[in-house]
Image (cartoon, coloured by chain):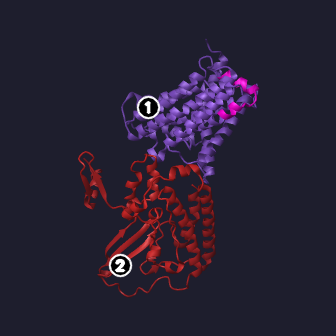
Amino acid sequence: MGLTTGQIGLGLVNLALVLFLSPLLEGCIRKLVAIVHSRIGPPLTQPYLDILKLLGKEEIVSANNFLFRYSAIFAFAAILLTSMLVPIGARPPLEGSGDIIVFVYIITLSAVMIMLSGVSSESPYGILGAAREMMMVLTVEPVIIIALITAAIKAGSLQFGDIMDYHVTHGPALSMVIVSVTLFLAIVAQLARLPFDIVEADQEIMEGPFVEQSGPKLALFKWTFYAKELIFAALFVSIFVPWLHSANYGLNLLYVLIKTLLLLVIVGVVHAVNPRLRIDQAVRYFAILIFVTVIGLAFALAGS
Amino acid sequence: MQAWRIREPVMWLCEKITGNRKLLGMNVVGGVRRDIPKSMHDELLRVVTRIDKDTRQVLDAVVNDTTLHMRCVDVGVIKNKEAIALSLLGPSARASGVAIDIRIDHPYAAYAEVGCEIAVETGEDIWSRVVVRLKETLEAVRIIKDSLQMMPDTDIIADMRQPIPPGKTGLASVEAPRGETHHFVITGEDARPYRWKARAPTFQNLQGVEIMVAGESVADVPIALGSLDPCFSCTERLETVDVRSGEVKIYSKKELYELSRSKFKRR
């Protein structure tokens, strides 16, 4: 089951986009949030500068165990692997090795690594943050899984490539509309954006699981979050907003990036105008969302 | 964030009137240092009207926000009886239904003539404190406008050429943004103070934290503490409790100095 050169090339392009374009998208969101707040805000290249600065800083270690040393690397590696499992402009390069199920596993791996970095840091704030991350994962992941499975049921396949091709040719369906709304909210929570940035709440628990990470490890965690933005947004627009499609790879990539930017603009506006929910309120909110997503799934099973 | 934007013109005005943005330095014994020139009255009225309009805009935008209500209503509750028992002051007390305000109870400066309507809410939670403060902002604008209109054309500083006799006591009570502030002075030789004590309202308001956060989740602690608007430099005791033995120790000023300096002594 070898990879063709086309797939290897595509994989490298996906990797490069996720690594080097995602901080620019994050910079756009930050600038937009600042404009809504009536302030000037940082330059668009600020996230690049943040990562570069952190990579050069001295590391202050609070605990000397395996998890604390490697959780940042595992989380980052998981996200980089995910970048080759999702469609950004074309079928995913590693589609022979992974489909929806593998994607969900690896996303959960990155969330678990965040939890473990909090627990292994031997700081009470870290443990509080890890507990919150656990509750968020348990309620947000089911929404993502059920939404993706709804899309898969309509397309009759678990491969992202097949799902994408199916939805391009078929128009909007009721189940897809219901599920796309809940998936959007789940993505806002996965990207740690207000009103769901409970895990990383700086004013309440001092950055939660990341309180003791510093220097290059913190840079990797921040980069992981920026990469997640591009991956989730590109996945969402490829499957749920696939119209405006082109057979030409370059043109299609451009369309996907434009749609991704628009989606992230909406995420940014939601972030700028909402206060933060408490963890118990967020869990209750997502329990209702799981219920709504299951209704969407039921519609898909019934044929619409 | 919008509140910072609304506040900025006030800082510019303060700089034009006093030369400083925040710590004004206008009070001297017997009066104030500088007058507000007639040429500035129009600008003053303009800025103050703008603040009133912007504050009402922000008030309209947030008063019905569901998530804010979810986080603030019925959180950080201090009941009326507890507020009276702890002698809470300022907006923290007025939000629990206790109608105290030195501007009404013992009017000073020109408050007897200009009048002052205090905002009292009975919600007893963080949301009530927010509403009290917003209403006070609007009332402050009204007081400024009325005072400018009623301003008489007299001296800004009393005749202080007589020497101040030693051994006299003076007590002044004003309504600061956080509550009642009292300053007590005993004059000494050479027109200098012999003793001076300031009692800031945060010293009492902080006692309310214990009641507000007991049993609540960690996420509520910062907003509950913030709603009291504590000024930590106005507290003046450090008390430590040894969790294992239950022993309580209160540090004196000398011990506090020793504690801080010992961290930096060379070993």
Residue A104 falls in which quadrant of the image? top right
**Chain hosting mark 2:** B
Please state the chain letter of the residue tagged with numbered disc 1 in the rendered image: A
- Label 1 – label 2 distance at C-alpha: 61 Å
The chain whose colour is purple is A
Pointer 1: residues within 10 angstroms few (<14), some, or many (20+)?
Answer: many
Q: Which residues are magenta?
A: A160-179
Is residue A88 something that shows in the picture?
Answer: no
Tell which of A225 and B97 is nearer to you.
B97
Residue B92 in sight in this render: yes
Give SS at disc 1: helix
Q: Which residue is mark 1?
A: A116
Report x, y in % for residue A101: 58, 22
Q: Which residue is mark 2?
A: B170
Q: Identify the image quadrant of residue A299.
A: top right
Q: In this rendered view, identify the residue nearer to me: B243 or A247.
A: B243
Q: For this rendering, which residue is in front, B51 or A41? A: B51
| B149 inside magenta stretch | no
Question: Which chain gets the red colouring?
Answer: B
